[in-house]
Image (cartoon, rainbow, N blue to C red):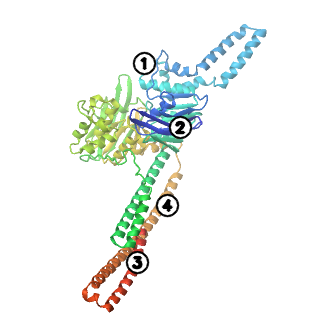
Amino acid sequence: MIVSCQNISKSFGTDEILKNVSFHINENEKTAIVGINGAGKSTLLNIIMRKLSPDAGEAVLSKNTSVGYLAQYQDISGGHTIFEEVLSAREELVRMEASLRDMEQNMPLLEGEELNRLLEQYNRLNHTFELHGGYAYRSEVTGIIRGLGFTEEDFSRPLTELSGGQKTRVFLGKLLVSKPDLLILDEPTNHLDMSSIAWLEAFLSNYKGAVLIVSHDRYFLDKIVTKVVELEHHKASVFLGNYSDYAEKKAALRASQLKAWYNQQREIKHQEEVIAKLKSFNREKSIRRAESREKMLNKIDRIEKPTEEHTDMKIRFEPNIASGNDVMQVEELAKSFGSNHLFSGISFEIKRGERVALIGDNGVGKTTMLKIINEMIPFDAGRITLGTNVNIAYYDQEHQVLSDEKTLFEEISDACPNFTNTQVRNVLAAFLFTDDDVFKKVGDISGGEKGRVSLAKLMLSEANFLILDEPTNHLDITSKEILESALNQYTGTVLFVSHDRYFINKTATRIMDLTEQTIVNYVGNYDYYLEKHDVQMRTIAPAAAASIKTERKNESAKLDWKQKKEEQAKQRKKAAALKRTEDEIAEKEALMQALNEEMNQPEVATNSARLSEIHGQMVELEEALEGLYEAWETLAEEE
């Protein structure tokens, strides 16, 4: 075990963040921490890193464990170039190498005992140098820098010229080069393009140390982690497997809990109905039975209904009018910025109902192409033709559709005047705005928050052609899933740029790869793209296996249908038997009532023969009713 979190609790004022959080990470284990924004993920990382003290509990690192921590925003400064900064992580090897070179230069100048002593010293140092990877560290540094998306020309760029995202990548490079026993990474893919993310996946999967990751990139987590720690309602739950395993187990667990709750509620309702019916018979034995059942019902251990953030929140958006089948045609499109030639001869078409993902490395011109289509910047050559009744809604990260003077609530309610206050709040809550946040002015919120408001408005725009530039940036996993569901139900057309491969996989029906200044089409999702992009194509075997699986599924469906019909027939018979028993009870109780009334008549009260006859009939009815009550109770239990 390399780190152990033991009953960690943390509050900020009256706001409880973590409560008795416990889990551990073993050597070489790859673990993810997941949860909605505000669940306490970064707080937990800061506690593990001793940057924050818990109110209770502790995070214990094993002795002599080296830790490398990448925060979401990592600034570095100094006069180094990119290569020098990353290389500085192996400073000890750099010094060893310099010492070895000095010794090699001095050897020709010495002889005898002095030379022998230097040779011994050289051999010892060289052995240590080799043992720590001294003959491979420079190529390793070069490989890591390239893997993180920097070109050979970038190696000599000074840190002072870099953006915040580029500096974070450089810092990540230093961490990977230093190879700590435990790597803690907070959103490591934020500033990486797809190629760099794929490279980082391979690097971390083969990493010899332990890795703890906080990330909203579900595809990334799927490829790397073997354990997921979920933070929900201030507590931690541990699931073995990758993200998809966690999502499946979490859904199954919640479904099981919900089923147990519904079953118990049904049983409680049923018992209450039985008790009420027994009381309605108004007989001493029936009342005693009812009281006995009430006592048992009061002792039952009531299951609490499972809750989950945004569980009942379903957002749909629909076009106002349908477009023609041909939504857009692009012919021989070209664009350059001075000497920077992005693309030329680009041609493609988009049909109604398609959800097309435009992918490619950073800098190839994806966002530029979206802006050209939206007439925000001119193109150099080519032609763009929109189809009949095409109405575009565009989401970019400049958020030009918002008014700084309006509150978030006003932005949504003005866009949808027919919405109730609850509906407006539900839309904003789906994009992480709750409570008094909805009354903040747009001008007072951050760029990421503005992006979320713009996305919420876009979903309600009634356009029939959505063009989205990185729509999942600044969204947590739950909000991404809500957006995925909305897009998958959308009957219009979507063209989007995204680095979120899980999002692409869930929503895209076609992928256009902008590479080598041209478009390559893949009719399918991201998994299909990977499959066809790979040199080694898969054989027909998986298709045959899928066919067998489908066949078995159909057979199972037929069996389920037959069983369902049999069960329904069985339930109908039970219901009919219960109804017959209740009718017999009512009939005999009515007869008993009539005999009682007859006994009270003056002429009968003095007729001993009739009284004896009535008494005999009442005894028979009493016995019959007792049997009917028991039969009814048995049938009611089986309902």
- Give the residue type at disc 1: Glu
Q: Residue under label 3, please give it.
A: 626
Percent position of residue 442, x then y: 27, 31
Residue 402 location, quadrant: top left
Tell me if 420 is positioned left or right of 21 in this view. Answer: left
Instruction: Please tell me whether residue 495 is drawn above or below residue 196 in the rendered image.
Output: below
Percent position of residue 479, x then y: 37, 41
Q: Residue under label 4, please give it.
A: 552
Crowd class of label 2 (few under 14; some 14 to 19; many from 20; radius 10 Å): some
User: How far apart are the alpha carbons under marks 1 and 4?
Assistant: 61 Å
- Give the mark nearer the N terminus: 1 vs 3: 1
Q: Residue under label 1, please give it.
A: 161
Which structural element holds mark 1?
helix
- Give the mark nearer the N terminus: 3 vs 4: 4
Q: Which mark is residue 6?
A: 2
Front label number (3 vs 2):
3
Crowd class of label 3 (few under 14; some 14 to 19; many from 20; radius 10 Å): some
Crowd class of label 1 (few under 14; some 14 to 19; many from 20; radius 10 Å): few
Which structural element holds mark 2?
strand
